[in-house]
Amino acid sequence: MANSLYDSSVMCYLQTLGAVSGFLDKGLSYCKDNCIDPETIVETRIFHDMLPFRFQIQSVAHHSIGAIEGIKNGVFRPPKDLPNHDYQGLKVLIADALDGLMKLTPEEVNAYEDADIVFEVRDKKLPFTAENFVLSFSLPNFHFHAATAYDILRSKGIPVGKLDFLGAMRLKT
């Protein structure tokens, strides 16, 4: 059985977004239990020239629900003027992305198989098919930002592990 566009995109996004939601919750609980202001995490960076935790979570949302919107519109761009979400706002952003993806049907997403999509950044335009956009651009970016957010939480002492990152795996039933 071949994977559909829905399977390759939405199902993968849902798994990892669920995990991100879970490790955000664990981070908040840890902060409360240890009298740490969760807002101190929002601007944390792994290295000075990397973007902060806030951007990593915003990018997870952008490269999931935003990628599907890009496929529908035929163009995907970096987000402009990102709000200064606080920790709770980041949790809401991920919940909204999950909610938006759960409303999509396989038929709706699969209707875009072989559709053209262009990634536009400044004066560059990179053309893709929907499948190649998801598999070679969106998912790698999505997982990079999710892993970076996870790593920032680990660097702050939040007790999360690999299973927290994997989320709900699609096991054979």
Image (tube, rainbow, N blue to C red):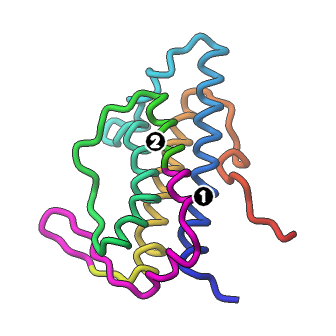
Q: Residue 78, which numbered label?
A: none
Q: Nearer the viewer, residue 99 or 159?
A: 99
| Number of numbered discs | 2
Judge whether residue 141 is colored magenta.
no
Residue farthest top in this picture: 35
Task: State how far apart marks 2 and 1 are (Cα).
Answer: 14 Å
Q: Position of residue 63 (x, y in %)?
A: 42, 58
Residue type, mark 1 in image: Leu
Which residue does the image show at 54% across and 51% down from the upper left? 99
What residue would you read off at disc 1? 14
Q: Earlier in the sequence, mark 2 or mark 1?
A: 1
2 over 93 or under it: above or below: below
Spot occupied by residue 150 in the image (x, y as percentages of width and height): 56, 42
Where is residue 30? Give x, y as percent: 64, 22
The residue sitting at 49% across, 46% down in the picture is 96
Q: Secondary structure at mark 2?
A: helix
The residue located at (38%, 37%) in the rendering is 52
Q: Residue furthest right?
A: 173
Q: In the rendered image of this protein, does residue 24 appear above or below residue 33?
A: below
Secondary structure of the residue carrying numbered label 1:
helix
Q: Amino acid at mark 2?
A: Leu
> Where's the C terminus, which quadrant?
bottom right
Q: Which residue is at 69% across, 45% downward? A: 164
Badge 2: residue crowd in 10 Å (few <14, some 14–19, many ≥20): some
Residue 77 position, x and y percent, is 26, 62
Residues shaded magenta: 97-126
CB within 8 Å, label 2 to label 1 = no
Residue 107 belongs to the span the image colors magenta? yes
Left or right: residue 56 compared with residue 30: left
- Image quadrant where one finds the N terminus: bottom right
| Residue matched to label 2 | 93
Q: Nearer the viewer, residue 36 or 17?
A: 17
